[in-house]
Image (cartoon, rainbow, N blue to C red):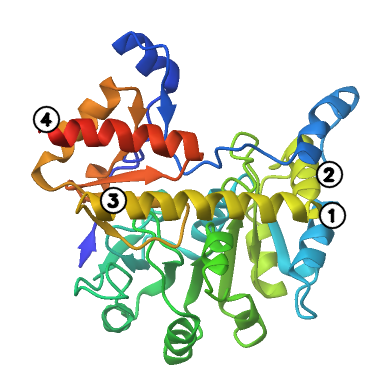
């Protein structure tokens, strides 16, 4: 299926202050943008004060210190700083991919209901968009990409394939083995982007990252973000992993000072703070288990998520429930622009926020 979309299709979650003012509320919680509710590592936060004296200086345009830290964190012999590109969030890495490999004569391929930025960056380059199907049969693979259909959707013009894993906004996962088999079956001339923005949450549930596939294939790019588990969404930093040849192609499209110095330093501190990562994942799992248990008790259908959100099917009542939650001080994410109008995406917040959401939801469902 070929599709074209406007570049204005990205709709961020509503602003807390806007909702407070509109509905005259003193308390509003935002569970719409997949942010880490506990905030960044304290070690990372200490950078804000220490960096003030150097704010008049340009950052390291090559991000050498951060690349070295990422390489140590990945801890694989086949990943060195030469295999890393740093971006203004992982979304910039996706944009660099489009700039480097897509033209108006080529096609980008990804599954339906995928992260909207894949469409946006493809449109920037006037590339044609081809969307493959999701698996809609109930079971462990529900709403994950149908890689068989994706393979059948490849044409002679396919230049880039985007595979989110876990996917946003569904949270669905594809196994490492399936991705490996898929890559081995397609042309090595096609660039395959594996978007691992939520990989830390997935690995905690037993999923295996695709990092080791970098040793096996020269046509893959893995993107990761500091905006999710590391809670650095406000400073914008992410990275990409690939062969030296592909990294060179991406760097050739990159602005010289694309990542500010505070973002670089906070990312380094975040990677060093292993305790922060462990504690964040523990808190997340407690809240995820609480939410899924409560949603089960309410007989609500939701997609099994390997990310830090849960996408819930409210059926025909979706818009009404969204509006009533909003008036109760809870911001969720409608998915109309993903063509999933019967779903709302719920970011997994703190335990207190999750309990507040469930209490308000129960009240709304009783009065529905």
Identify the residue at horizontal 53%, vertical 74% (top origin).
206
Above-or-below relation of 162 to 272: below
Identify the residue at horizontal 76%, vertical 41% (top origin).
266
According to the picture, the residue beneath numbered tag 1 turns out to be 64
Q: Position of residue 335 (x, y in %)?
A: 26, 45
Above-or-below relation of 212 to 114: below
Q: Check disc 4 and report its element: helix, strand or loop.
A: loop
Identify the residue at horizontal 69%, vertical 59% (top origin).
85
Q: Is residue 211 left or right of residue 3?
A: right
Point out the tag, 3 or 1, that comes first from the N-terminus. Answer: 1
Above-or-below relation of 242 to 32: below
Q: Check disc 2 and report its element: helix, strand or loop.
A: loop
The image quarter in which residue 317 lies: top left
- In this view, the residue in front, 345 or 62, is 345
According to the picture, the residue beneath numbered tag 4 turns out to be 367
Mark 2–mark 3 Cα distance, whole angstroms, equals 47 Å
Q: Are marks 1 and 2 in contact (CB under 8 Å)?
A: yes
Q: Are marks 3 and 4 in contact (CB under 8 Å)?
A: no
- In this view, the residue in front, 343 or 220, is 343
Identify the residue at horizontal 20%, vertical 71% (top origin).
136
């Amino acid at each position: 299926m070929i599709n074209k979309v406007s570049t204005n299709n990205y709709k961020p979650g509503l602003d807390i202050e806007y909702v407070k003012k509109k509905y005259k509320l003193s308390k509003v919680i935002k569970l719409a943008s997949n942010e880490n509710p506990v905030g960044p590592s304290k070690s990372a936060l200490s950078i804000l004060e220490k960096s003030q004296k150097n704010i008049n200086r340009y950052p390291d345009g090559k991000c050498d210190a951060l690349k070295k830290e990422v390489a140590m964190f990945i801890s694989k012999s086949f990943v060195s700083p030469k295999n890393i590109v740093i971006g203004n969030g992982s979304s910039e890495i996706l944009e660099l991919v489009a700039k480097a490999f897509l033209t108006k004569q080529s096609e980008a391929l990804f599954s339906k209901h995928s992260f909207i930025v894949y469409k946006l960056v493809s449109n920037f380059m006037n590339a044609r968009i081809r969307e493959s199907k999701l698996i809609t049969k109930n079971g462990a693979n529900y709403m994950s990409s149908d890689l068989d259909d994706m393979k059948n959707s490849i044409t002679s013009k396919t230049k880039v394939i985007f595979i989110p894993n876990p996917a946003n906004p569904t949270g669905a996962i594809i196994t490492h083995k399936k991705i490996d088999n898929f890559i081995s079956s397609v042309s090595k001339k096609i660039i395959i982007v594996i978007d691992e923005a939520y990989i830390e949450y997935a690995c905690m549930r037993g999923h295996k990252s695709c990092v080791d596939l970098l040793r096996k294939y020269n046509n893959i790019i893995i993107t990761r973000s500091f905006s999710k588990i590391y809670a650095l969404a406000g400073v914008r930093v992410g990275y990409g992993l690939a062969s030296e040849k592909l990294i060179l192609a991406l760097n050739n499209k990159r602005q010289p000072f694309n990542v500010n110095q505070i973002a670089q330093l906070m990312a380094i501190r975040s990677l060093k703070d292993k305790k922060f990562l462990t504690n964040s994942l523990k808190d997340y799992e407690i809240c995820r288990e609480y939410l899924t248990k409560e949603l089960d008790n309410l007989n609500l259908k939701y997609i099994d998520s390997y990310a830090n959100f849960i996408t819930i099917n409210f059926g025909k009542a979706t818009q009404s429930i969204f509006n009533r939650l909003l008036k109760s001080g809870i911001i969720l994410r409608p998915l109309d622009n993903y063509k999933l109008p019967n779903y709302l995406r719920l970011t997994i917040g703190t335990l207190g926020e999750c309990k507040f959401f469930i209490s308000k939801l129960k009240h709304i469902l009783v009065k529905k």
